[in-house]
Structure formats: structure tokens, C-alpha cells
Amino acid sequence: MDYIFHIAIIVSIYGILALAQNLVMGETGLLTIAGAAFYGIGAYVAGIFSTSLGLNITIALVAAPLITAVIAMILGTSFARFRDDYFLLATLGFLMIFNTVAKNWTSLTGGSLGIAGISKPHMFGITLLTPESFIWLAVFVLLIVAIICYFISRSSFGRALNAIREDEEALKIFGYKVSTYKLASFTIGASLSSLAGVLFASYLTFIDPTLFTVNESILLWAMIILGGIATNRGALMGALLLILIPESLRFIGFPDEISGLMRQCIYGLILIFLMLYRPKGIFGKYNL
Amino acid sequence: MFYSLLVVGFGFILRSSKFFNVAYGGAFLVGGYAMFLLYRMYLVPFFLAIVISLALSGLYFVLSNKFIFEPLFKRKASNFILLISSFGLLIATSAIIGIIFGNQATIVARHLSDVSTVNILGGALSYVQLATFIVTPVLIIALAIIYYKTRFGRAMRAIENDREMSELVGISTSNITMWVYMISGILAGIGGIGEGFEVGINPYAGLFYILPIIVVAVLGGMKSFWGGILGAFVLVIAQKLTVLIFGGSWEQAVPFVVLIIVLLVRPEGILKR
């Protein structure tokens, strides 16, 4: 039973990440690979708050999005002039720098050993120790993120973002401040990702730099593309499927090392086949 | 040195197909692991093993083009799709290699003599490093001659400039592209083999190397043959300086700091065409 709750928690965490990635990459069309970096920043904020500063994870849940938003704002402003491939390269650069910093700034991040002993969240007098209790927090945060994303995609702000994806120049002519919209989307996406990071860190109670690499970002790509880019339920569906399919491999009885690689292999192949045969994904309405 | 050869191959692909084909890292892995399988496991003679491994890495790249990138190109897919599918291919390749050969670093060298060093001008060089120093300039010059002086090279440059126009004037673009992929696959394979002898190759090496190569290609200016090589030298010097000043563990971040600076300051790279 615990196992089912465990899977549900992982699915909610990735659901948050996929929704955030979808906001930036799907709705706005900003090609970013920095998803894992913001996820990682959230996790490290939680880790540092809980171990070095001895604070409650609930505070990290508020602080992480703020800290990430500031970082994303700075990045977004300096990356604003890049388009498409170049934006991707710049975000890739940021992700790699984040990885190196996480690995090398030993006094803050614990280096490649990571941070262990992160506390479980403690709220309303209860400590969420078991997966059964943690699931409520995870689902609650997922719900909030989903509602935010839902309202963004329905609002005039969301429509402006979609317009940026379709034709940036045209929108500029209509007098929209395109760069502000892009920056806002990038920043919101980053803060939402960091929430997932906080949840992940306090659920696992342990983080290290290898958890937040390029592979993780590509997994997020695979999720939103499989579900259908620029649709919120697509992002959730993608997260659900891409966690469940590889998880089912465990029951066929591969050893752990192989099943991890199998998972990578499945993600890769899914991406290739989707690109070849159905770039729209499952719920797709928008062609890449 | 090592980067400059790899970046030449990557540059060919980048210029002829106009996207960052990260599956290049896959060809790197195929070359290295094929060499491991042939030379170390099946004890095939050295030169034969090299030839077969390079053929395999070239073939890998040609087939990937045939079955993945060419169909996408025909559909006029956006760069985004091409990039994602090449990332998918790289990840799938490294995972499959990991499943077959295991996750740890694999040393290709069979004898102790393969890794012994020679003293030249007061510095100790391993045979691999020595070979790199000899092979790289020779290959680069040979490639430059092919690229600038032959009919084939002219066709390559024509395709890089304008694919549709070259098709109109009767250049068989798909044929030339196939050979371009073959050549770059082989260059990537050479890199993989070198890596396998020098420090051992692991399934993540493809991703590990492709990122600095992209940086080098952007740094040198994507449109020129020599720019990439210049970029490689600039990057390596920057890396070594960082090691001197800040210590070795920060070396990996250098390419990306350089990348961001270059993108901000001079997105067209050092050499313009």
C-alpha cells in the first residue's frame, strides 16, 4: 500500500514539474532545458533550510519559490534577447553551472555527497512521516499549481503567451511588451518547479547533484510532449504515464541498475517515436 | 587537440543540417565501445579493430540520419523537433550501451604497452596523446583539403549555404548528406576510441562531451571551418587557467560560463564569415 502512495507522490511531484515546464515551453514556446536547475534549487533551498538553518520545511515551501523567482528573473532578463536554439543553449549553460556549483560548493551544498537528513514537513502539529500522510501535502501543492496553470492558460495573460509562441513579431506590433510576458512566464514556471524540489527533498530526506541533471530536464520534455504540448491535462497525463510505464518494469524483475537504464532508454525512444509519428502528443492541439 | 577534431565533425553536421545534432555523442560512444568489444574482448588486431569501429560509428550516424532526421527534414520539421529527437537518440543510445556494457568506465587498452608513456621535450606523453598530436593535425588538414578543394567539398559547402538551391542545380543532396554524416560519425568515433584508451569510456561520456563541443562550435562561430578549431583552443586555455586559479573541480563549468558570456557579448562567435 505504501508503494502505491509512494508512486502517487512521485507522480504529483513530476506533475508539478511538468505543469511548470508546460507553462514555459508549451504555452510560451520558450525552449528551456533549465527545468531541472530550478527543481534542484528548490530542493537545495529545502535541504539547506532544514539542515543548516534548522527551519521547518513549510517555510522552505514559501521561501524556495521566492528565491527561485529572483534567480529566474535575473536570468530571464539577461537571456531575454535569445531566441529558440540560443535560448536553449543559454539555459543549458545555466543548468550545467548549477550542477557544477551544487557539486563543488561543499560548505553550502555538501558537494557530491549531497545533503542528508532533511526533515519531513511538520504542520498543524503533525509530522508527515509516512507516504500516506505526505501524499496529502503533495496533492495539495499539485492542486494549487494546477489551478494556477489553469487560470493562466484561460486568462488574457495566457492568451498573450500563446500569441508569443505563434508569432512574436506580430504581437510586438500590437504593442505588447513581449519581453515582459516572457520573463513573467519564465519566472512563474521556475518558482512552480522549485515547489516540486522542496517536496522532493523533504520526501526523500536526501538530495545530491546527480538528481538534477540534463536527463531530468529531458524527462520533463518527454512528459509534456507525450501528453501534448500546451495542454495542462496533457502535462499531467505525460507525468503519470512516464512514471508508471518504467515503474512497471520493476515487476518484470530487472535488477535496479538495469531498470534505471531501461527507464532512460524508454524516455529516449518515446521522444524519437513521438517526434517521428505524433509530434502533437496525446491531447495535442498544437503542432510543434 | 581532442576537441578540435570533434568539433570539426560536429561543425559539418551543424552547418549542413542547421541544428545541434547531439546524437553526435552517440556516434562517439559507438566508436569507443565497438573498439572495446573488438580489441579488448575479441582480440581483433589493432588496426583492423580501429577500421571496423570507425565504420560502425559512421554507420550509426548515417542510419540515424536515414531513419530519423531525414524523414523529419522532409516534413520540414522545426529545429525544435530535430533537437528533441536527437536528444532522445543520444539518451537511448547511452542507456542501451549502459545495459550491455555496464555503467562503469571501461578501459579499451589491452596491454600495458598501450598506455605506456614516451618522453618528448621533457614532458611525458602517453601513446594516445602522442597519436592525438599526430593524427589531429593530419586529419584536419586532410578534411580542409576535401572541404575547400574537391568537388565533394564544394557540394558540401553549397548544401550548407542553400540546400534547396543546390538540389535545383543538380547536386544529389541526400547522397552528399549521407557522406557528411559518415565523415562526422567517423570523427566522433575517433574521439570515442581516444577517450577509451586515455581515461576509459563510460555510457555518459556522449552527453558529457557533446555539451562542450556545442559550446566550442558556438564560440568559434558556427559558420566557419576554422572557427571551431580556434574555439577549441580558446576553451581549453580558459579551462586550464581556471584549474590553475580555482582548482580542478570547477573545470566543467568553464565551457558554460564562456558560452553564456559569448552568447551575450558576441552571438556570432569569434570568427565571422
Image (tube, rainbow, N blue to C red):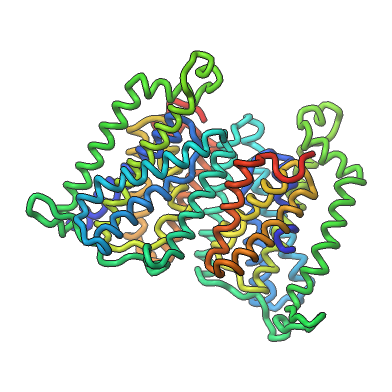
Judge whether A134 appears above or below B106 on screen.
Answer: above
Given residues A218 and B111, the one toward you in this image is A218
Furthest residue in direction top, as rendered: A174
Total number of numbered discs in the rendering: 0
**Quadrant position of residue B94:** bottom right
Q: Nearer the viewer, residue A252 or B222?
A: B222
- Which percent across, then down, holds residue B214? 64, 50
* Of residues A162 and B104, the one drawn nearer to the viewer in this rendering: A162
Residue A240 in sight here: no
Q: Quadrant of the N terminus of chain B?
A: bottom right
Could you say which is closer to the camera, residue A154 or residue B233?
Answer: B233
**Picture quadrant where residue B2 is located:** bottom right
Asked if A15 appears above or below B31 in the picture, the reply is: above
* Residue A119 visible to the viewer: yes
Q: Please provide percent x and percent y for residue B114.
A: 72, 81
Q: Residue furthest left?
A: A125
From this view, report whether residue B120 is shown above or below residue A40: below
Q: Is residue B151 left or right of residue A237?
A: right
Measured from the top left, where is residue B211 in percent x and y? 59, 53
* Residue located 23% across and 36% down the image: A144
